[in-house]
Amino acid sequence: NAGVTQTPKFQVLKTGQSMTLQCAQDMNHEYMSWYRQDPGMGLRLIHYSVGAGITDQGEVPNGYNVSRSTTEDFPLRLLSAAPSQTSVYFCASRALIGFPPRYEQYFGPGTRLTVT
Amino acid sequence: ILNVEQSPQSLHVQEGDSTNFTCSFPSSNFYALHWYRWETAKSPEALFVMTLNGDEKKKGRISATLNTKEGYSYLYIKGSQPEDSATYLCAFQIDSLQGGKLIFGQGTELSVKP
């Protein structure tokens, strides 16, 4: 299993450009999510999905869109990049295990995005 | 607004020292408490997931305890080694209909000097 993969690893955008961060997992996990990590802010949830065709907003959704057409893929779209979106982005997927049921979450390697 | 606080923000210890840090979280709507180890330039790796009040988990020299009634968890590292240097994150999992979102603390950055 490759686990959770993300592309690209690094990206530089100009203000106003759009792009899509790719995320894929091969563990058949229903739950996937996107976080951004900023200094002093910890990991903040952008969007999440509990299964194909179902997405919802997290703490900081503005400026981002997601879709979930398959179980494996959960792309994050920046509609019009702004310097405030300079961050490291982590995709994660989650499996329900054990009793009582609990989630084990797996993170991708991250995408470092700079918006100038 | 649900808040997860970790203390201290950073910790510098000598090799062989034992250390511990705290994660404070809301005592209501609790489902689980997660601990992650996050090395620089890597992605966070799960250490423990705890669900029951009084839970204690152990993995090698690292252990964790959970008190859901008062809303805190401790992570202990016995005999710290330089390879333990990392940021340790805790995350509070909400018991909700929204798929159990995780709310992360800001992390405790541990540096172990040889």
Image (cartoon, coloured by chain):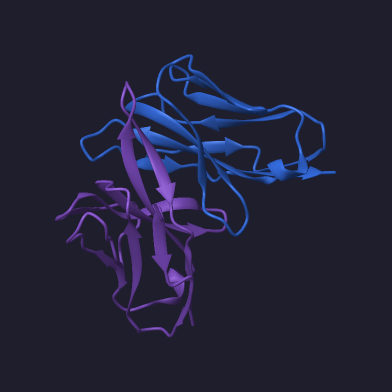
Q: Residue at x 48, y 70 (%)?
A: A9
In this view, B22 is above or below B105: above
Q: Is residue B100 above or below residue B43?
A: above
Image x and y of residue A101, in percent = 31, 26
User: Tag count in the figure?
Assistant: 0
State the residue at coordinates (57%, 54%): A40
On screen, residue A89 versus residue B114, left or right, reads left
Horizontally, residue B31 falls left or right of residue B43, namely: left
The colour chain B appears in is blue
Residue at left offset 47%, top offset 62%: A110
Vertical relation: B80 (above or below) A73: above
Along the line of sight, the residue nearer the viewer: A107 or B29: A107
Residue that protrudes farthest toward the front in the picture: A1
Q: Residue at x 14, y 56 (%)?
A: A53
Chain identifier of the purple chain: A
Residue B103 position in % (x across, y down): 41, 42
Q: Is residue A38 left or right of residue B103?
A: right
Residue closer to the observer: B90 or B86: B86
Where residue B26 sits, quadrant-wise, is top left
Q: Quadrant of residue A24?
A: bottom left
Which image quadrant for residue A70? bottom left
Residue B72 on image: x %, y %: 51, 25
**Residue B87 in the image: x percent, y percent?**
62, 46
